[in-house]
Image: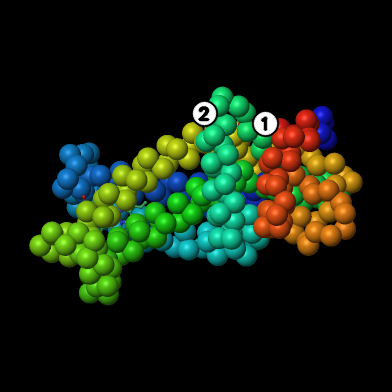
Amino acid sequence: MKNNTATVKRHSFLYRCLHWLIVTEMLLLLLSGLNLSEYLDFDFISRGASRNLHIVAGLAWISTTTFFLYYFIMSGEYKWFGLSKIGHAFDFFVHEAKNCIEGNKVKSPVAYGIKKKQYVEKVVPTAILAWWGWFGLWTVMAFTGLAILFPGNFNTINSLCHGILPSFGKAAAATRLIHMSASMAIVIYMFIHAYATWTFGLTGSMISGTREEPVVDPDREEFNPFARQGNGMRRTPAPFPKWDQGTPPPWKEAEEDDPSHPSV
Ligand code: HEM
């Protein structure tokens, strides 16, 4: 531990392997998909080869992401990204946007408790919005991809896409356009994700697994952020669930009271 920070294990080996495997599969899908598109003019390998590559990579990607989601929930990682936190994450996003316009730095609520050897808060709340965005895009890509591949089995998806784009003569054509448009959204999202993780200094930990994290005051750490308030102790900087109880959001308190708290 040095200067109120400690080197902490942030991501397990399996988590990192799954992350980079998904990235590789998505890049392969993107390249082979662009090669297949009739709307876009990218031809670097034959159509047959790119189609085979796309289908194999697509099915592998669906398996990897399904296992990743299972691991994400079972390993406890999901608790930092849960649906119930979206409202607060949105508040933080507005707070970040306001400060960005005013030219102020926003304090990160990420903090680690050395006594209990666990995170008090693991993610910058905007990452919660990013995660659900990925989840939405993955769902669209997987279901529209399967509907193009197995139209008989995924007829509902084709009908749904046709409902969204009724001007198309064939439902399959509407599904293909939605699949292609979502893949373009993925390209934009990938750039934003790479830029944001880089600026927040999070890229290294997805390679090494560890990160130098700010440590909370051990006396405040005892206060379990997920327990009910009522023992008169001050909150640690980042207890999400208690924001519901009329207390100011933790980042505000952290900014006002905790000069040692890190900036992002
Ligand atoms: C990140 C994930 C994915 C990306 C970026 C992606 C991208 C693309 C793109 C750009 C096209 C061309 C669309 C057009 O303009 O017609 C395409 C076509 C296609 N995709 Fe995907 N895709 C992904 C996942 C999947 C998955 C999971 C499957 C299903 C296993 C799949 C199956 C297909 C099929 C069957 C086609 C049409 C191939 C043909 O023309 O015969 N895709 N994809």
Residue 154 visible? The answer is yes
- Label annotation for residue 101: 2
Q: Position of residue 85 (x, y in %)?
A: 59, 56
Q: Position of residue 201 (x, y in %)?
A: 61, 33
Name which residue type carries label 2.
Ile
Relative horizontal placement of residue 8, taking residue 182 as reference (left or right): right
Residue drawn at the location 20% of the way across and 64% of the way down: 162
Residue at mark 2 to residue at mark 1: CA–CA distance? 16 Å
Q: Position of residue 148 (x, y in %)?
A: 24, 63
61 or 173, which lies in front?
173
Q: Which of the two discs, 2 and 1, labels the residue nearer the N terminus?
A: 2
Residue 210 visible? The answer is no
Q: Are marks 2 and 1 in contact (CB under 8 Å)?
A: no
Image quarter of the C terminus: top right
Relative horizontal placement of residue 211, taking residue 37 as reference (left or right): right
Q: Secondary structure at mark 1?
A: loop
140 or 84, which lies in front?
84
Q: Where is 16 relative to 176, above or below?
A: above
Q: Where is 33 relative to 139, above or below?
A: above
Q: Where is 168 relative to 248, above or below?
A: below
Mark 1 surroundings: few (<14), some (14-19) or many (≥20) residues within 10 A: few
- Label annotation for residue 263: 1
